[in-house]
Image (tube, grey):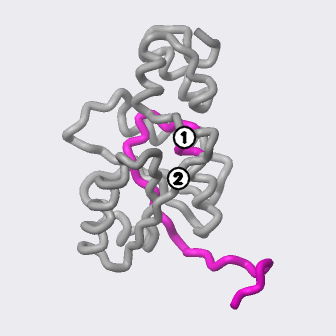
Amino acid sequence: MTAPDAPRPVAPVALYAGSFDPVTHGHEDLITRSLGFADRLVVAVAHNPNKTPLFTVEERVGFIRAVCGHQPRVEVRAFSGLLVDLARQVGAHINVRGLRAVSDFEYEYQMALMNRHLYPALETVFMPPSLETTHISSSMVREVARFGGDVSGLVHPVVARALAIRFGTTGGAEGG
């Protein structure tokens, strides 16, 4: 049995992939908390040819770097293709997934099983959001911003400004 104050085992590399369109305070929370069990976290911004995102992959990578740039243990990169291929490339054995609602679970569970089939060394860790960020999703942030609502409590100021510019509103960081 381990003493309560003993250091926790730490994985060398964890992977947190998503579209991050845009990155929210909920994503930031999971990034920060993931560093509690990984030496290094690779935040991977997915290029999905089946979706039409609001922001380009390059913009989304830039936003995450602005949000996490102070953290030397976080690497941000773009990727396309299979997550397991990226995991192998970066040496990740943990795949971090956020679960806001029970409705997220079925899809995420199926993906975790497929990823394990393709790369047995990759374990998926499901993390619930903090209570303060449970209600935040990228799609809701986009919708609020589209109609000029105040998203300053939901996203980093850099993202709020970008949303206001994209939608031609003043709702971003100034209030709406």
Residue 12 is covered by the magenta coloring: yes
Q: Amino acid at mark 2?
A: Pro
In primary-sequence order, the first of circles 1 and 2 is 2
- Residue at 44% x, 37% y is 60
- Give whichever of 62, 92 is nearer the camera: 92
C-alpha separation, residue under disc 1 versus residue under disc 2 = 8 Å
The residue that mark 1 highlights is 134
- Circle 1/circle 2 CB separation < 8 Å: yes
Q: Residue furthest left?
A: 50
Residue at 29%, 53% (x, y): give it.
107
Disc 2 target residue: 128
Given residues 113 and 32, the one toward you in this image is 113
Residue 137 image point, x, y percent:
46, 35
Could you tell me the amino acid type at mark 1? Thr
Question: Secondary structure under badge 2?
Answer: loop
Q: Position of residue 22 (x, y in %)?
A: 45, 34
What's drawn in magenta, residue-wise?
A: 1-28
Q: Does residue 94 lie above or below 23 as drawn?
A: below
Residue 11: quadrant of the picture: bottom right
Residue drawn at (34%, 52%) of the image: 79
Q: Nearer the viewer, residue 25 or 74?
A: 25
In the rendered view of the protein, which quadrant contains the N terminus?
A: bottom right
Q: Secondary structure at mark 1?
A: loop
In this view of the protein, which residue sits in the foreground, 84 or 62? 84
Q: Position of residue 130 (x, y in %)?
A: 61, 47
Residue 109's disc number: none
**Quadrant housing the C terminus:** top right
Q: Furthest-front residue in view?
A: 102
Neighbor class of circle 1 (other Cα within 10 Å; few <14, some 14-19, many 20+) is some
